[in-house]
Amino acid sequence: MNEERWRGAGSAVLRMFAVWGVSTLTMLVLAGLLPDFKLQSPDGDSATRIAMTAALGAGVFGLLGALVWPLLVRTLLLVPAFVLAVLVFFLNGSLLLLALRLVPVNRGEVNPETAVVVAAVMSAVASATGGALAVRDDNAYRRRLHRLAYRRYGRPSGTPAPPGTVFLQLDGLGHDVLVDAVGKGLMPTVAGLLGGLPSHRLTPWRTDWSSQTGASQLGILHGSNFDVPAFRWYEKETREVVVSNRPASAAELQRRAVERTGDSGLLSLDGASRGNLFGGGADQLALVLSVAVRRGKETRSRAGYFAYFSDPANAVRTVLSFVAEVGREMCQSTRARLRRERPRMGRGGLYPFVRAFATVVERDVVVAAVVSDLLAGRTAIYADLVAYDEVAHHSGPRSRDAEQILRRLDRSLALVLKVAELAPRPYRIVLLSDHGQSPGETFRMRYGLSLGELVRAGCGLPVPRKVRRTHSGNEARAAVRTALHRPVEERAEEHHAAPRRSDPVVLASGNLGLVSFPDVPHRMTRQEIERRHPALLSTLAHHPGVGFLLVRDEEHGAVVLGAYGAEVRLEDLGEHPTAGELGPLAVFGPGAAEAVRRTDSFPHCADIMVNSWYDPETGEVLAFEEQIGSHGGLGGDQSRPFLLSPLALSAPVPEGGELVGAERVHEVLRGWLRESHGPQIPLPSRPAEAAAAPVPVPPTPPGAGGM
């Protein structure tokens, strides 16, 4: 063992000197290329003295990077991520200036602007050199893994460690889009898991009505997404809008789920949560939104950046990729505009930077955190990669831009798989998505007004002149005048038969709209809405951009309304209703009625729930938000995500069965964790009305220690 340690120490020293030598050579080359960067005195120096200056400068720069950089990054954790990304260059340049000042021979000279460039190039070259040498030195890499394993578990005994599980969520990637991407050769790593001698099985699953990350991930990680009707909704008792991706809202939703289930979550046993909205009960948290409102460096959402950016080479590499991604987005949006692609939305302003942050910075930090968790041998890891979802919203779920993101995500997956092979314990890698995305124009693009403006017109409230000029706005105003028995030519819709009340709150979650009346403390019934606004429900139900409405009837309970007077009473539907009985729900496929019925039971279900039009032939929907790839309601790929699981684990559903709802997915994942030979993870105690059927846990198949 002593000989092994000496050999490892020798390899590390050799790599250190190799990186130093390459850094010195890089500094010499840059001094020859850049006129503002000098390594000799004005009177000239010998080649030996110049080389000595470069060697000392490179050595001091590397030493400062190792000692000072982590302290700088920790100090800057409170700085917004965008600002930190820019400061990386200037901080690195400052370290180079300081290094040249500390060189004893005092020959180095460089302008501050040039120092930024020189430092960036040197850090990138040093990182590439060190990484290449470490990868080629397999023995050194294996020794490092063993040391990490000893630190985490102690020295391995004769019995191998039970397998751990990694859940990688590819946010927003639908089942059919994944299949097409594999068929096109965009994702060779995923293709390798499914083709030849497959190691994994692909299973589609169906979301709840609210097909978005807030509802799906809360259900998957915490076992309950009860009373999450959409991505954003209005709560009358607090007079506040809950938005799933706000830290305070995410913390409250997590608290409600834990209170309902009586269990801390999927990752409660030695778990790690990376890049998620919710913690899942994990002890190890990085970039988790629900803990962002807490105090303390261990719980801040930015705390995950420290481990990554404490390495200056990582910082430079990521920032360079960030800048390249901003340029790539600008080129792609310009090309789409010149080609007059349809549908197309504006992608200016800060969006290029938002996209670069999601597709580069967050991806790099989350993948690095997962790699660290694998090397530490954690039992359960759940990480969310949001890159595809962000790009698909603005470019379309099947666009060339989105396909390029899938290629890069596949490379990230390949890295995780490679590290898992070298980890101190075997790992099972599970890929899944929380929802898909459905393409289509926005509601505003097609009709010239938003859902909120249509609701206001249907209520007889003032709307902008441009809305009054649209066909939809004219029809809504005419319906109001007719309902109030006014002459059609009268243009005084601002006058009301009743005293002025609070304006309705209209919110959008993809192609799902929610209308609430804040001055009424309870959920309004159909009859109450019609007495207050006689034309509103008919205006919405008959609009060609609306698929159906959900309202509460005083006599019949949950009622779905559609065009031409269609009406479906959900309590009257049998177990297997026909298409004729489903009415406007029939086009949305099996399970739509049950999903709508479940949402109707939520205490915070809106007064009117509006699902947009859907074309089953093209898969298109009309988003009430400004997105050409959307999710949040029913219709198309958005409701059909996937679960890619190792064959070593039990099948998620019996053959011919269907996996429905995020809570059911939670039970499946929890069942897989319980199949391990390690400490058993108990099923949570849940209220009878929220509990799903228990997942049968078959005996672990032979050889189940694989991926």
Image (tube, rainbow, N blue to C red):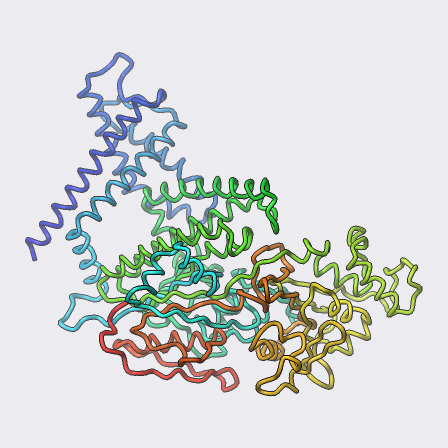
- Name the quadrant of the C terminus: bottom left
Rendered view: 75 above or below 202: above
Relative depth, front residue between 592 and 1: 592
Hey, which quadrant is residue 378 in on the image? bottom left
Residue drawn at x 41%, y 66% as measured from the top left: 432
Relative depth, front residue between 302 and 388: 388
Rendered view: 36 above or below 490: above
Residue drawn at x 34%, y 54% as measured from the top left: 368
Q: Count numbered badges in the picture.
A: 0
Q: Is residue 29 left or right of residue 265?
A: left
The extreme left residue here reads 3
Q: Is residue 671 left or right of residue 328?
A: left
Residue drawn at x 71%, y 68% as measured from the top left: 518
Residue 178 x %, y %: 44, 61
Residue 264 x %, y %: 42, 74
- Name the quadrant of the N terminus: bottom left
Residue drawn at x 18%, y 58% as measured from the top left: 147
Is residue 421 among what the camera can see? yes
Residue 164 x %, y %: 29, 69
The extreme top residue here reads 43
Relative depth, front residue between 246 and 125: 125
Rendered view: 681 above or below 540: below
Q: Is residue 370 left or right of residue 258?
A: left
Residue 560 x %, y %: 68, 77
Rendered view: 212 above or below 79: below
Hey, which quadrant is residue 325 in on the image? top left
Is residue 296 among what the camera can see? no
Relative depth, front residue between 223 and 408: 408
